[in-house]
Amino acid sequence: RSILERAAAASFPPLHAVHHLLSVGVCVRCIFRMFGAFSHACSCASLTVSFFHSFLEEHDDSAKGGPCSCLSTDESCCSICFGILLPTCHQDEGVVPFDDISRIDIITSMVSQAIQREGYQIDGFSLEISLPAVVAANERAIRLYMKEKYGSENWFKDEMFSQQTMSAKEGLRLLIAPSLEKQLGVKHGNNSFRIRLTYTHDDASLKLKSLLPNDSNRKRKAESREGNDTRRNSTYDDKQTLSEADSFIHKSLEGIQDKEFCSLFKLPPEKVSKPCHLVISFLRSPIYIGGRYLKLSRNVSQSCWIIDDERMGEASVEVKHTASESRPNPTS
């Protein structure tokens, strides 16, 4: 409770606005994150909607007077992060249930078990997180909704919803990395062993993609530039297609002005009942023993080794071609 007291005193808006965010399906951690108080939420494992509402009842008269509709969000997912910051997620074996002690420990326990099952021996790890583009879209929708609803009130400032607010990805990293260090007994940092958490939400991503103007045309043009024939590859697996489309969706969202965004998307976004699907994967970076390695690229020489400033081996076709072109033309 003292954590909530400090957060409310530091940067929170009037508590009736916080209560309203809960009622439209925003989870407690996203509220803390959006108002620049996520560091307080990191240290509170039992931060739930029910617990937070009891705090509001003590400090805000508008939260008193009987059951609140926001309490139902304990059984649903956040309309911004889709339950990522208060983890409940789908895996291939079904829905990962809530844990009364620490929901973050559910994820770290799954990672630890997978590492043991696959026989990895590690001395550290780096953490990679991939979130669906719809998370960023829904967060922007909530920001614009709050601006529309409270923009005329004295307490509201655009800075409270600035783009410098911690992202959901960084928030999840702050939550999971310390728990993983404790679970695995090694430190998180720049390491050759990479743990990748890939979150997807097919239904929401498909719906978002359908709302974006000319998204399919942009994707087709980009793939054509890369030499892919979209007509021949139209039978790609849906999940792979959605993953590849995320970068295009992000670029499309960045190019949409707020006014156009409000006309395309529902404000506030709909409440979510289905969590994200989580895939845990591992990757070791290659270890280079010695010498100089160059990627196979038409833009660089294909020689693998330079010893004592002397190129070893034959020059590539490109090097020979460039050398011949560099000679002065006697007829010019």
Image (cartoon, rainbow, N blue to C red):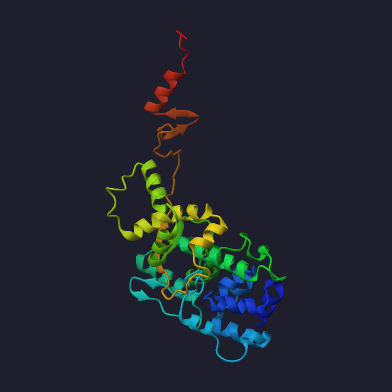
- Residue in the image at 58% along x and 84% along y: 51
Is residue 207 shown left or right of residue 261?
A: left
> Where does residue 84 sit, x and y in percent of width and height?
48, 70
Q: Residue furthest top?
A: 331
Question: For this rendering, which residue is in front, 116 or 290?
Answer: 116
> Where does residue 176 sit, x and y in percent of width and height?
52, 69
Is residue 83 shown left or right of residue 4?
A: left
Count how many numbered circles sit on residues in the image: 0
State which quadrant residue 229 falls in.
Answer: top left
> Where does residue 225 sit, x and y in percent of width and height?
39, 41
Residue 253 can be seen, yes or no:
yes
Q: Is residue 193 above or below residue 147?
A: above
- Residue in the image at 55% along x and 81% along y: 49
> Where does residue 259 sit, x and y in percent of width and height?
56, 58
State which quadrant residue 96 falls in.
Answer: bottom left
Quadrant location of the N terminus? bottom right
Question: For this rendering, which residue is in front, 63 or 211?
Answer: 211
- Residue in the image at 59% along x and 78% along y: 20
- Residue in the image at 41% along x and 35% along y: 304
Question: For this rendering, which residue is in front, 138 or 94?
Answer: 138
Q: Is residue 267 above or below residue 133?
A: below
Q: Residue furthest bottom?
A: 66
Is residue 181 shown left or right of residue 115?
A: right
Residue 315 can be seen, yes or no:
no
